[in-house]
Image (cartoon, helix red, strand yellow):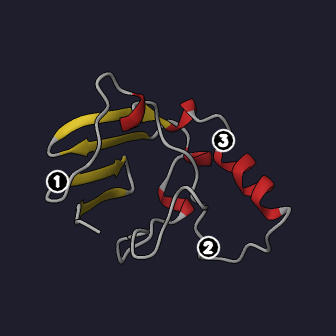
Amino acid sequence: MMGKNFDRSGAFEPEITTEEELPAGARGLRIQTRLNGRVVQSAVTTDMIFDVATLISICSEPFALAPGDIIISGTPAGVGFSRNPPLFMQAGDQREVEIEGIGTLRNAVAAE
């Protein structure tokens, strides 16, 4: 959690997709991140190190999970600092994260 969210940075849309609306285990869903319309990360959920069921199982050991809880995990390859040259978001950039069958989260990047 420490590396995933900071005050006012964990934005979610007003709607949540339920398990019944997705393939079993959320397998095979395309995940893309676009920065100013350009795809900078692209993967499928089957590429994840731990599948969704395993993430839930692991997280339920130290935490009491309840309906509506959100588990925040890693990110596909292509993170900005690992690029050559590095790519970092700047104030005014538009970032979109899309998960097939779930939706697209759009955020403008603001200066601190």
Residue 102 higher or lower than 36, as above or below:
below
Task: Tell me residue 36's x, y (percent).
Answer: 15, 46
Quadrant where the C terminus sits is bottom left
Looking at marks 2 and 3 on the same chain, the residue that comes earlier in the sequence is marked by: 3
Give the number of the disc on residue 51. 3
Front of the two marks 2 and 1? 1
Secondary structure state at the residue bearing disc 1:
loop
**Residue type pointed to by label 2:** Asp
Label 1 and label 3: CA atoms lie apart by 31 Å
In the displayed structure image, the side of residue 25 where residue 41 appears, left or right = left
Give the number of the disc on residue 69. 2
Secondary structure state at the residue bearing disc 2:
loop
Looking at marks 1 and 3 on the same chain, the residue that comes earlier in the sequence is marked by: 3
Disc 1: which residue: 93
In the displayed structure image, the side of residue 70 where residue 76 appears, left or right = left
Q: Residue at x 42, y 29 (%)?
A: 82
Q: Residue at x 60, y 61 (%)?
A: 2
Q: Residue at x 86, y 62 (%)?
A: 61
In the displayed structure image, the side of residue 61 where residue 99 appears, left or right = left
**Residue type pointed to by label 3:** Asp
**Label 1 close to label 3 by CB (< 8 Å):** no
In the displayed structure image, the side of residue 104 where residue 70 appears, left or right = right
Compare residues 29 and 24 and report the one nearer the observer: 29
Label 2 and label 1: CA atoms lie apart by 29 Å
Residue 51 higher or lower than 108, as above or below:
above
Secondary structure state at the residue bearing disc 3:
loop
Task: Tell me residue 21's x, y (percent).
Answer: 47, 58
**Residue type pointed to by label 1:** Asp
Label 2 and label 3: CA atoms lie apart by 17 Å
